[in-house]
Amino acid sequence: MGIRRSWSEKTFEIINIMVLLGITIAIFYPFYYMLIVSISDNVSVMTNQVKWLPINPSFKAYAAVFKDPLILNGFVNSFVYMVVGTTLNIIMTSLCAYPLSRNDLYGKNLFMKLIVFTMFFSGGLIPLFLLVSNLGLINSIAAVVLPGAISVFNMIIMRSFFQSIPFALTEAAHIDGANDLYVFARIILPLSKPIVATLILFYAVSQWNAFMGPLMFLTEKANYPIQLFVRNIVIEGQTSDIGMAIGATGASAAAEKSIKYAIILAAAAPVIALYPFIIRYFEKGVMVGSVKG
Amino acid sequence: MMESSRWMQARRNIIRGKYLYLMLALPVVYFALFKYGPMYGVVIAFKDFKVYDGIMGSDWVGLKYFKRFLSDPNFWTLVKNTIVLGLYMLIFGFPAPILFALLVNEIRQKWYKKTVQSISYLPHFISMVVVVSMVVTFTKEDGLINQITGLFGAEPISFLLHAEWFRTVFVASEIWQTIGWSSIIYLAALSGVNPEETEAAVIDGANRLQQMRYVVLPAITPTIVIMFIMNIGSILDVSFEKVLLLQNPSIYETADVISTYVFRKGLEGFQYSFATAVGLFNSIVNLMFLVAANQLARKFGNSSLW
């Protein structure tokens, strides 16, 4: 009996491990596949030989991508939008979250209701587009970063964190006559580094990944973030944008494939680089239990 | 007398909180301008909006554009596509993270569990453009998917040029993207399962599958019910960005949904009033679903979004 049970136990364990190994490979392999194709030579890409390891690896495709001035400019734009956007996000989110975390704020519930309502109902694409264009923001960085300045979800997470800071820590300062700005800047913020760091990561990722805003509000290629170039080149097949890059590698279908994967991976690279930090903060459990406002 | 002292009290509270209101000033302006501004802009759905006349100056036309949408030859296709895509996600997309969480929960090796989880969250953080770029290139005739199905003797297909394949591609890629991240809430619920109960089941002679079926699954059923109701609430709220990026004119028959139609008519066709009316129709239906689902959750699960 005992032997039989441990037998079925073992079979279960092994099957479970294998199934999850399969799922994990299915999730990860596409990224790996793009990497090996992007650095393999054209002939082996053409004949579909690249499966597990790169063949005659070289970084020609990446060199070609970064030689293209428009695409390089796209990366620079994305980086600028990310830094400016995230800074604005953090400032605006904490300005919003702290007063709303205070129970003694008169009208707090009304503010909260009006803000949470915007999570469930919006005016829609066209009115937003008309608003941004009436404000004269089309083709400016403001059009990219302003409409999403505060994510209500992130604001609620931050507010919950502020609420969890014991009142005893700020009481003394309040009694000594310190005003709320001082308490916020000198006591609350220094205690909130973990949540600020987490939100910086989350906002930075979504700024880098942003697509709808730039698509709607930017019309000049010179202003495009990299995501729009990836969409135009890979999804819409507008090879005119990388005509120069392909020309430089000897216009073949295989070269085009490698270059496309190189662009896709390059556009995902900053997020992949931030990913270990995201996981680390995540494991610290900063987000857990703070979701419900 | 009572009234006036209440006002005095309120005034005192407001004066005492003046720095807090000062902090709130910018966020309030932001929400008023960028969230409530467009809600005001929705009135152009009831007007014949002309850019030159502005929102105020354009003429009222009542429900003209709503009527036009209801009699639009595309109306039923759009509604059907939106609902079918939402239903497919509910049927196939909803159980996937639950099964995944149940399997992950059974792993005894801590490092393996951690690795599986960390890798499974990755696609959630990758941009929609990059994910769809991968899907588009992999589903081409010489793409990765066809190379794999070719091993089993299947004929290569350009999946995204065939209307009948769109939903499969959409749902499969959506599961790939979200299975890990969506499993978090179930894993959190699973970590609350009392180990004494599983031990009792072991003593009663239950094998691992029976333990999962009779002890672990019932323990997370409340979470599953709530998540299911919430999913029904957002059933018509299909991932707009993803559909927009994945679709192409040759597969509009199955791939065009209400929100992408709004985008095309409004921003590419400049029919601002018509597109706003269609968009408003879409968000009101979505909101109704969400409110109804929330009532259900409140009734059966003692849980609510608000």
Image (spheres, coloured by chain):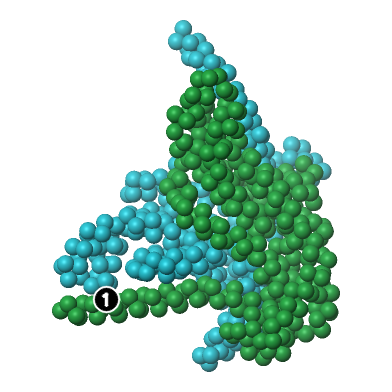
Chain colours: A green, B cyan
Q: Three-letter amino acid code at disc 1?
A: Glu
Front-most of residues B36 and A109: A109
B62 vs A15, left or right, is right
Secondary structure category for the residue under label 1: helix
**Residue A34 quadrant:** bottom right
Q: Which residue appears at 77% of the width and 72% of the height?
A: A65
B235 vs A136, left or right, is left
Front-most of residues A257 and B303: A257
Task: Specify few, some or many for label 1: CA neighbours under 10 Å numbering under 14, 14-19, or 20 or more.
Answer: some
Q: Which residue appears at 72% of the width and 90% of the height?
A: A43
Q: Identify whether B53 is placed above or below B147.
A: above
Q: Which residue appears at 27% of the width and 72% of the height?
A: B209
Res. B276 visible in picture: no
Front-most of residues B79 and A114: A114
In the rendering, at what x and y percent does residue A100 appear?
53, 33
Q: Identify whether A246 is placed above or below B239.
A: below
In the rendering, at what x and y percent does residue B252 appear?
63, 69
Res. A222 visible in picture: yes
Front-most of residues B60 and B104: B104
**How many numbered discs?**
1
Q: Which residue appears at 49% of the width and 41% of the height?
A: A161
Q: Which residue is mark 1?
A: A9
Q: Identify whether A186 is placed above or below B160.
A: above
A52 vs A57, left or right, is left
In the rendering, at what x and y percent does residue A226 appear?
73, 62
Q: Write down the chain letter for disc 1.
A: A
